[in-house]
Image (tube, helix red, strand yellow):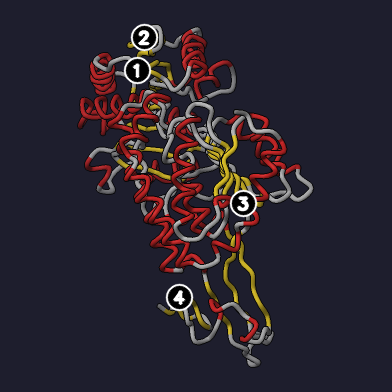
Amino acid sequence: MEATAQEVDAAVRAAHAARDSLTDRTVRAAFLRTAAERLEAAKEHLVEVADAETALGPVRLTGELARTCYQLRAFADIVDEGAFLDVVINHPDDTATPPVPDLRRYKIPLGVVAVYSASNFPFAFSVPGGDTASALAAGCPVVVKSHPDHPALSELVAKILRTAAAEHGIPAGVLGLVHGFEAGVELIKHPLVAAAGFTGSVRGGRALFDAAAARPVPIPFHGELGSLNPVVVTEAAAAERAEAIGTGLAGSMTLGVGQFCVKPGLVLVPAGGAGDQLLKSLTDAVSDTEAGVLLDHRMRDNFVAGVAERLSLEGVDAPVTPGAGGEHTVSAGFLTVPASKLAEEGAYDLLLEECFGPVTVVARYEDETEVKDVLSRLPGNLTATVQLSSQEAAGEGRGADLLAELTPLAGRVLVNGWPTGVAVAAAQHHGGPYPATTSTSTSVGGTAIERWLRPVVYQGAPEALLPPELHDDNPLGLPRRINGHLER
């Protein structure tokens, strides 16, 4: 089933040849909506196949498929609106200093996009997921490198998307699919691939990122690699609602057997007093969590080994020990450590690295200085969360300062919430400083389309030669900015 170099080349060339079929925005939008309809029509079979390969469960998978279909339709709406083209026109102005010539700017698709599927979201971050949907919406054909944890589902979904494409006269090559590690390497090196999207490990993502940069012509590589997703609980918040915070944390860190990229992996909690109450609530809630199946045995082995390595550090305790729950399952748990041990470089740096699975590290701090010291050592993250008291949330105390301290660390900063659950919305940002992502873009939400576009400006070009998007009479009815004024 592993694709050869020749098969990868054929898939990329077929995608490249299909570019003109996506030129018409009306056709693109209709294709995306039809794809959503065909996926919904095959829901029962798709969920059955996905569950057989991933063991994520019908409820979770049904919800994820619904999210994926919603996402396809959301990008269709974006294509219809046309604001993503970012049309800007400046008419000649000889009175300006220096004089302004006739300038007309908009965005065009980059070309073939390579998409690398994730293991933990077989729909939403795989063949029909956000990278694919946003790339097609931008007018870019796609070649997907499937994830080895769900190859049968990948083939089935690709066939459905190609059927949807055919209904609008779009060739099947608009969506290529290849399998295998070497195929993924060949894909990123192919000279006709213009950009790439990746969701996965730091190690795998960094290798592909480096390969993309080392090409004779480097290409944009938008990778989501890993995230610790820190949480800070203030003393006042713990005193006000210790039980609720402990229960909420347990639900977030064990959701999906801890296999979400936004799982809270490090939590700063006050030592003693209300912090002890919070830990008791967390202990009770995590202890009631049933063991679950991870996506594959490699992940299970890494989880068990990672927990054991962390527990071997002096001063690290496990009020609820995570680890092997059975022959194929793992049990949830959490570790505790004095925050002072994380404030300096050394063996405890391991606790500042993501451990994929149902575990979190609770660092007990004595004062605000320890909180600052730990935060100053954290790498980039997808999310950062602060749990505040009602008074702090109203502007009293350190709430604003903590928000300011967390902002440089993450792409999404939460107050009195939990990071698991990433809404598909126009204002969403799912990205963050490295190693959370390799770029400043988002892989969720409407602005994800921007990754696959580049601006071009025409100077002094007669209107008869210009694309209709840049004509003065605006025949396509696009939102645009004319001589500095926004037009709708």
Which circle's residue, 4 or 3, is located before the other in the chain? 3
Relative placement, left or right, of 445 versus 467 is left
Give yes or no for contact between labels 1 and 2 (Cβ–Cβ under 8 Å).
yes
- Cα–Cα span, label 2 and label 3: 45 Å
Relative placement, left or right, of 52 versus 185 is left
Which circle's residue, 1 or 4, is located before the other in the chain? 1
Q: Which residue is mark 2?
A: 325
- Dot 3 lies on which element? helix
Which circle's residue, 2 or 4, is located before the other in the chain? 2
- Cα–Cα span, label 4 and label 3: 28 Å
Check the image and name the residue furthest to the bottom: 95
- x and y percentages locating residue 170 in the rendered image: 52, 58
- Dot 1 lies on which element? strand
* 269 shown above or below 391: above
Numbered disc in front, either 4 or 3: 3
- x and y percentages locating residue 169 in the rendered image: 50, 60
Q: Which residue is mark 3?
A: 15
Q: Which residue is mark 4?
A: 478
- Cα–Cα span, label 1 and label 4: 50 Å
The amino acid sitting under disc 1 is Gly
Q: Which residue is mark 1?
A: 292
The foreground one among 309 and 79 is 79
Is residue 210 in view?
no
